[in-house]
Amino acid sequence: MSYSTLPHKPTVPLEPFRIAIPEEDVMELKELLKLSRISKETYENTHAEARDGFGVSRDWLIKTKEEWLKFDCLYWFTDCYNSSIYAYRYSLGNKRDEPSAEKEYQKKPVGFSFFPKELAPTPVKWVEFVANVVWSREHKSGGHFAALEKPEELWQDVEEFVAVVWK
């Protein structure tokens, strides 16, 4: 058998992947949260199983780590990283010769979903100065990873925008 050949059936039964988080790690995270600038309200009342008001419990951490690991692996192993950072390229100091989107009004129809916890939240009115905004919605929660945090709401936004422009 060469290294490039895979067996037709696994020789060892597959087991589900699990992440174990020791109690001391949970406690360390809670202590760090107390010292951080993150407001207590961010974590309070989020998770009913929390014991101390921070909303951080072992179950929540395990679920969160597994969720991020799943998405990170999908992102890394599909080699999406290279193309996904393209949008950040010019905001980090690289300049290009042709006019930038900031200097040219975008005439194509644009939909815009505002999530208040975005890294750089941009009000809808500002977007309207640079683009032909035909549909927008301001959400009460969510942020930079809206597709992970609020998938139903974001998908509803996409469907409503498409319904407006695709007649």
Image: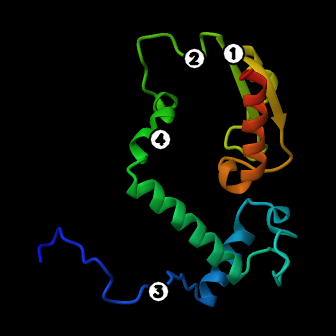
Near mark 4 (Cα within 10 A), the count class, few <14, some 14-19 or many ≥20, is: few
Mark closest to the chain's N terminus, 1 or 4: 4
Q: Nearer the viewer, mark 3 or mark 4?
A: 3
Residue at label 3? 15
Helix, strand or loop at disc 1? helix
Residue at label 4? 84
**Could you tell me which quadrant the N terminus lies in?**
bottom left
**Residue plotted at (45% across, 34% down):** 86
Gap between marks 2 and 3 measured at Cα: 49 Å
Helix, strand or loop at disc 3? loop
Answer whether labels 1 and 2 touch (C-beta < 8 Å).
yes
Mark closest to the chain's N terminus, 2 or 4: 4
Near mark 1 (Cα within 10 A), the count class, few <14, some 14-19 or many ≥20, is: some
Q: Nearer the viewer, mark 2 or mark 4?
A: 4
**Which numbered tag is attached to residue 138?**
none
Amino acid marked by disc 1: Val
**Which numbered tag is attached to residue 130?**
1
> How many marks do you count on the picture?
4
Mark closest to the chain's N terminus, 1 or 2: 2
In the rendered image, residue 64, in percent from the top left (x then y), is placed at 64, 70
Answer whether labels 3 and 4 touch (C-beta < 8 Å).
no
Q: Nearer the viewer, mark 2 or mark 3?
A: 3
**Residue plotted at (78% across, 20% down):** 134
Gap between marks 3 and 1 measured at Cα: 51 Å
Res 7 quadrant in image = bottom left
Answer whether labels 3 and 1 touch (C-beta < 8 Å).
no
Helix, strand or loop at disc 2? loop
**Residue plotted at (41% across, 56% down):** 76
Is 52 placed left or right of 118 in the picture? right
